[in-house]
Image (tube, rainbow, N blue to C red):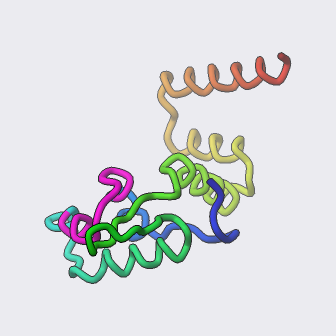
Amino acid sequence: MAYKKAGQYLTEAEWQVMECVWEKAPCTGREVWEWFQGRTTWSRSTPLTLLGRLENKGYVKTEKIGGRKQYTPLLTREDASLQEAKNLLQRAYQGSVTLMVNCLNKKEALPKEELDQLYELLKGLEDEDHA
């Protein structure tokens, strides 16, 4: 699913609310607030405000059922993660995956298992391009 408007990203707080909505959907505002009790010091109005923002951005839809709003995600976790990754890659590494991996490996050597997984991923991508 594409974002409603180009350049709209989930804030850290919105991401937390989306985690709850992805996990519990469909869910009410009360269920979201209860999910955050003990996890944050947010007041009751904070997740409700964030749900409104997410609805305005087109990331969740609401439906009135039995007099209560129920929230359902329109944005998948996978699509949100992809957008976040693209944003980070562009912002911090000029869009270069090679620069990112090189930077990560310079500061802290990547474990052999991860290097093997990256190699297999790249090999698979190369095979797809030549198929």
Q: Is residue 55 above or below residue 35?
A: below
Q: Residue furthest left?
A: 38
Q: Residue at x 53, y 51 (%)?
A: 81
Q: For residue 64: magenta?
A: no
Q: Residue at x 73, y 25 (%)?
A: 125
Query: In the rendered image, which quarter contains the C terminus?
Result: top right
**Which is nearer the eye, 34 or 38?**
34
Question: Percent x, y for residue 6?
Answer: 70, 69
**Which is nearer the eye, 81 or 88?**
81
Q: Residue at x 28, y 72 (%)?
A: 68
Q: Is residue 110 above or below residue 126?
A: below
Question: Percent x, y for residue 127?
Answer: 77, 17
Question: Percent x, y for residue 22?
Answer: 38, 53
Q: Determine which quarter of the picture holds residue 90.
A: bottom right
Q: Residue furthest right?
A: 130
Q: Is residue 35 above or below residue 48?
A: above
Magenta portion: prevailing SS class: helix
Q: Residue at x 22, y 64 (%)?
A: 31
Q: Residue furthest front?
A: 66
The magenta stretch spans which residues?
21-34
Left or right: residue 130 versus residue 62 is: right
Q: Determine which quarter of the picture holds residue 65.
A: bottom left
**Which is nearer the eye, 97 or 121?**
121
The number of numbered discs placed on residues in the rendered structure image is 0
Q: Determine which quarter of the picture holds residue 27.
A: bottom left
Left or right: residue 103 versus residue 51 is: right
Question: Percent x, y for residue 113?
Answer: 48, 22
Q: For residue 22: magenta?
A: yes
